[in-house]
């Protein structure tokens, strides 16, 4: 049974470039979450979707960040333009319908902005 | 502000010893979850304890919850080198009316020496 799949695993790019991170959730899961992890701030929730609809994007740092979920099996997180302070590990997670269900995480994308 | 805070930040023990990690949180919850993260990987769900439960076991893991003190503990018995990882508690947003959104602490880094 495939878990949450994220791509790429590593991304190194120069400041100002557009970055697109991809996520395939576990089939049948209703919720999809995007997190960012840094040493300083820990694991922060950026945005989450329910049935492909964004529910809470209050964690998105600024307008340079956008996320979409065009269908139940695919989501993207885009940063445009990227800045060095966006360097972090970005995780995608999915879970079943609400009620305290555990979240299943992908292995993340390690993003470095030079 | 961060809902869950783990203590200690780092813990180093010998194989075979028990490891205890604590988590404190600030507001009412529906449930509390513990996750584990190996270096370079995503978080993996370990155990969930609901607000009306006081203790839960899963293999070598024992979790307690004290809602009056807003605290939880994770005990790993007979630790193994393979238990070396970071451990996070996560609480849901009961005060905000939902339980699908989790807030993670900054974790306890456990090192088990062979």
Image: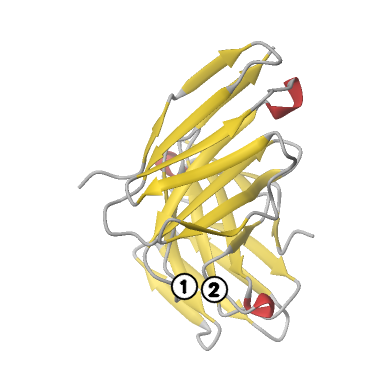
Camera-side residue: B107 or B82?
A: B107
SS class of the residue under badge 2? loop
Tell me the residue at 75%/40% (across/down).
A62
Vertical side of B95 occupied by A79: above or below: above
Vertical side of A55 occupied by B10: above or below: above
Quickly name the residue at label 2.
Answer: B99
Quickly name the residue at label 1.
Answer: A100
Which residue is the extreme one toward the right?
B1
SS class of the residue under badge 1? loop
Tell me the residue at 71%/35% (across/down).
A39
Q: Residues within 10 Å of mark 1 (few under 14, many from 20)?
A: many
Q: Is residue B34 left or right of residue B106?
A: left
For mark 2, name the chain: B
Which residue is the extreme one toward the left?
A1
Residue B108 percent coordinates (x, y):
63, 49
Q: Answer yes or no: do the residues labelled 2 and 1 have beta carbons within 8 Å? A: yes
Q: Where does the C terminus of chain B fall, quadrant-wise?
A: top left
Residue B14 percent coordinates (x, y):
52, 43
Tell me the residue at 44%/33% (across/down).
A22
Q: Is residue A108 left or right of residue A61?
A: left
């Amino acid at each position: 049974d495939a878990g949450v799949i994220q791509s790429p695993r590593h991304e190194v790019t120069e400041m100002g470039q557009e970055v697109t991170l991809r996520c395939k959730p576990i089939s049948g899961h209703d919720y999809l979450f995007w997190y960012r992890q840094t040493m300083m701030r820990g694991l922060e929730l950026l945005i989450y979707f329910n049935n492909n609809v964004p529910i809470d994007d209050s964690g998105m740092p600024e307008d340079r960040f956008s996320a979409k979920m065009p269908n139940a099996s695919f989501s993207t997180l885009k940063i445009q333009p990227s800045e060095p302070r966006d360097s972090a590990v970005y995780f995608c997670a999915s879970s079943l319908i609400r009620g305290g269900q555990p979240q299943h995480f992908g292995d993340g994308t390690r993003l470095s902005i030079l | 502000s961060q809902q869950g805070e783990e203590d200690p930040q780092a813990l180093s023990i010998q194989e075979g010893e028990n490891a205890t990690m604590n988590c404190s949180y600030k507001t009412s919850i529906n449930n509390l979850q513990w996750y584990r993260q190996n270096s370079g990987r995503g978080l993996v769900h370990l155990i969930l304890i609901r607000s009306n439960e006081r203790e839960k076991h899963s293999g070598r893991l024992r979790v307690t919850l004290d809602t009056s003190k807003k605290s939880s503990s994770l005990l790993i018995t007979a630790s193994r080198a393979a238990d070396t990882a970071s451990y996070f508690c996560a609480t849901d947003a009961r005060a905000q009316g939902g339980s699908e959104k989790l807030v993670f602490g900054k974790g306890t880094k456990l090192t088990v020496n062979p």
